[in-house]
Image (tube, rainbow, N blue to C red):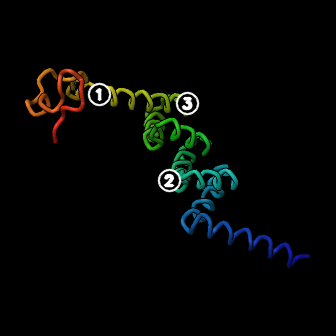
Amino acid sequence: MMYLLIGIVTLFILIFYFYFGHSAMILFYQCLKHDVRVNYWELAVMKKNGVPINDFLKFAIKLKEKDIDVKIKDFELHRKSGGRVSNVVDILLKAKRNKVDLTYHQASIMDLDDIAKHKKAVADSQPVTKTEDSPETSNAENAAVPESGDNSQIKD
């Protein structure tokens, strides 16, 4: 019975290692050490969806070291909404350093507002292009299409 349990645990570790890789396994261990709550199945789904789990685990550890509790799932949701998780982490760390009470939700809203302002500034700085047909067409284009609409007169 003991060998069966050891075999199952070893199999689980090997599957984790080959699916997530060496660095994720080390980060998973560090999460356990720093008391960051990480769900294996949640990580598997995030990896399948192309989420950078290594970065998210590093961010979670960094925030936990500063006594800021954040769920890994919040990182994924913010990323899906078009936000930059690294900016949210920076905002939270700066707020903690300056002794400002700020929740993850408030920091993520600040990041999304910043992104929206940046996109608006980029859109405003682009030159306006005409969408209507220009009345000025070349003589070659005018000669190719007869005014009567009869296509039999078009010559190649």
Q: Is residue 132 above or below residue 105?
A: above
104 sits to left or right of 29: left
Residue 22 x, y percent position in the rendering: 56, 69
The disc placed on residue 137 is none
For the point 18% across and 29% down, the residue is: 145
Single out the residue that lies furthest toward the bottom.
3
Residue picked out by circle 3: 105
Q: Which residue is mark 2?
A: 55
Label 2: element kind: helix
Secondary structure category for the residue under label 1: helix
Q: Which residue is mark 1?
A: 123
- Asked if 121 appears above or below 92 in the picture, the reply is above
> How far across and down, in percent of the image, does residue 149 sit?
24, 23
Residue 63 is situated, as x and y percent measured from the top left of the image, at 53, 45
User: Residue 128, located in which quarter of the rendered image?
Assistant: top left
Q: Is residue 140 left or right of residue 57?
A: left
Q: Which residue is rendered at x = 64% and y = 50% of the image?
A: 36
The foreground one among 126 and 103 is 126
